[in-house]
């Protein structure tokens, strides 16, 4: 795999994982009134690590000047159980009589946040492709 493929593969994986997460959050919202439904989410950090396991590290020239830089951005609020990158059950914030664990405030917030991050990924890949095209065309 060359550097071009590796760089574009990262964005492809990010969009795929974001899309899967958006579907899970939408399912949570759709089942907000379903008795005994358990809200689920994806650990984005772990899913991306699994998806990018085959990408060459030298394709990305990222330098961390502090060990805390990326760790704070990649934290999540999903219980740590199950296979890495698989949907996990969201912790219960407020119990309900019917056993449903969907908190609509949390789900709407996560849905909007994930949608914004999806759009940001699209913007970044479009900018990267425009830069590559400009370099190829010499303009």
Image (cartoon, rainbow, N blue to C red):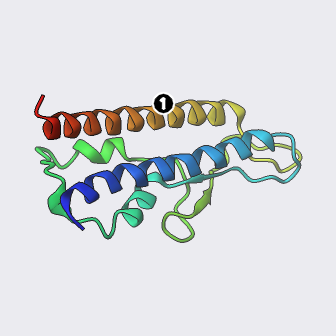
Front position in the image: 25 or 136: 136
Q: Residue at x 73, y 46 (%)?
A: 27
| Callout 1 crowding tier (Cα within 10 Å): few <14, some 14–19, many ≥20 | few
Front position in the image: 50 or 139: 139
| Residue wearing tag 1 | 116
Q: Residue at x 75, y 53 (%)?
A: 38
Q: Is residue 40 left or right of residue 8?
A: right
Residue 7 spot, x, y in % from top left: 26, 53
Residue 20 spot, x, y in % from top left: 58, 51
Q: Is residue 58 left or right of residue 109?
A: left
Residue 128, placed above or below residue 35: above
Quadrant where the C terminus is found in the figure: top left
Q: Residue at x 71, y 33 (%)?
A: 104
State the image quarter where residue 131 is shown: top left
| Residue that extends furthest to the front in the rendered view of this protein | 137
Residue 13, placed above or below residue 122: below
Q: Is residue 66 left or right of residue 82?
A: left
Residue 75, placed above or below residue 116: below
Front position in the image: 105 or 85: 85
Q: Residue at x 33, y 68 (%)?
A: 53
Quadrant where the N terminus is found in the figure: bottom left
State the image quarter where residue 94 is shown: top right
Residue 121 spot, x, y in % from top left: 39, 38
Q: Is residue 81 left or right of residue 28?
A: left
Residue 100 spot, x, y in % from top left: 81, 47
- The secondary element bearing badge 1 is classed as helix
């Amino acid at each position: 795999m060359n550097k071009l493929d590796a760089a574009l593969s990262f964005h492809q994986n990010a969009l795929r994982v974001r899309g899967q997460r958006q579907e899970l959050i939408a399912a949570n919202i759709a089942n907000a009134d379903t008795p005994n439904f358990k809200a689920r989410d994806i650990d984005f950090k772990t899913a991306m690590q699994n998806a990018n396991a085959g990408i060459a590290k030298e394709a990305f020239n990222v330098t961390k000047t502090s060990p805390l830089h990326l760790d704070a951005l990649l934290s999540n609020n999903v219980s740590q159980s199950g296979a890495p990158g698989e949907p996990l059950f969201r912790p219960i914030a407020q119990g309900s009589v019917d056993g449903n664990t969907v908190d609509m405030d949390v789900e709407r917030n996560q849905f909007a946040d994930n949608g914004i991050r999806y759009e940001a990924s699209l913007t970044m890949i479009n900018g990267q492709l425009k830069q590559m095209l400009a370099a190829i065309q010499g303009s």
